[in-house]
Amino acid sequence: MKRTKGFTLIELLVVIAIIALLLAIVMPALSLAKEKAKNLSCRANVRSLSLALRLYSEQTNGKLFGYHSGLYINQLTEHIGELDKVRYCPSTKVDDSINYTAWGSSQSSWTWNNGVTEPEHGSFGLNGWLYSQTPSGIVSKNMFEARGYSNTLNTKNSAAVPVFFDAIWVDAWPQDTDTVPVNFNLDRGSGGADPAFNHIHRLLIRRHKGTSNVSFLDGHVESVELEQLWSLKWHREFKRDYDKRRTDNKTPIYTRQ
C-alpha cells in the first residue's frame, strides 16, 4: 500500500514559526498605519471646526459668541456638514450612557450637560481667549480685556493663534504661567481643582503619541508636540518662552513622560 507523504512535526513547527515571525513584522506596521489614519482624520475634523468658526465670524463682523451663549458645537451647527463625525477624534471612545457633565481623557470624549436638552459629547476644546465675553470666575474682566481676542478674530499673526485642539474639555484658557507636575497623568489629563489655574492641563493628553492636533485662526492645522504648546500665542500677551521657563522648584515647565 502506497502512503501519501505529509508534513513532519518539525516541518509543521517551522511553518508555524515563519508565520508567527511574519505576523510580528507586519502587525506593528499595520498598527502604525491605522494610527496615522486616525491622526489624519482627527486633523481634518479640527480643520472643519475651525472653518465653521470662520464662516460664523464672517456673519458677525469677526466676533465670536460669548461663553454663556452655549456650547460651541451648538453655535456652529449650521456651518458644519457632518457634525456627529467632526466633533470627535477617531482615537476616542464615546459613552452615550453618560448623561451628566464629565471630563474626557486621552481615549474618551467629554460630556456636556449644561442647559441642553440632551448631553453633548466631543473630543476637542476651544481657545477661551477667543470668546467675545468670558466669566470672571475663570479670568478677571480686566485680564480678559487686556489679553483676549474678543474685539475681533481678524487679528494680526493669525497663523500663531490656536483655535481648536485635542482636549479633555470643551474649552481652555492657557496662560504662560501654567506648569506641569512631574507625576502628571498624560492618559487622564486634568481639568484642575481651580478653573483659574493650569488650563493647559486640559490639552496635555497622550492621544497622539505626545502630540496634539491644533487649528489656527488662518485656517491651517498642525500636529504640535505637547511641550511646544507653550510656544503658541494663546492670548495677546502670552510669553512664548516655554523652553526657558522653570517651575518654582526649578524643574522644567514640562516634563516628557
Image (tube, rainbow, N blue to C red):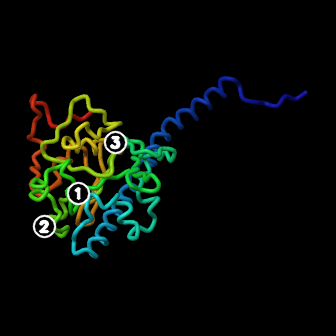
Q: Any mark on residue 59, and which?
A: none
Q: Residues within 10 Å of mark 1 (few under 14, many from 20)?
A: many
* Real-space Cα separation, disc 3 to disc 2, in angstroms: 32 Å
On-image quarter of the N terminus = top right
Left/right placement of residue 81 relative to residue 127 reads: right
Q: Sequence-wise, which precedes: disc 3 or disc 2? A: 2
Tag 2 secondary structure: loop
Quick check: 75 left or right of 161? Answer: right
Position in image of residue 54 (x %, y %): 28, 69
At label 2, the amino acid type is Lys
Q: Residues under labels 1 and 3: Cα distance?
A: 20 Å
Query: Which residue bears the numbered disc 3?
Result: 209
Is mark 1 in CB contact (under 8 Å) with mark 3? Answer: no
Residue 178 is situated, as x and y percent measured from the top left of the image, at: 16, 41
Residue at the image position 22 percent from the left and 29 percent from the top: 182
Q: Residue at x 15, y 67 (%)?
A: 151
Residue 202 location (% of width, % of height) = 28, 44
Secondary structure of residue under mark 1: strand
Does 49 appear above or below 230?
A: below
The residue under the point 17% across, 53% down is 232
Amino acid under disc 1: Pro
- Can see residue 122? yes
Q: CA distance from mark 1 to mark 2?
A: 13 Å
Residue hosting label 2: 156
Which image quarter holds the C terminus?
A: top left
Which residue is label 1 attached to? 162
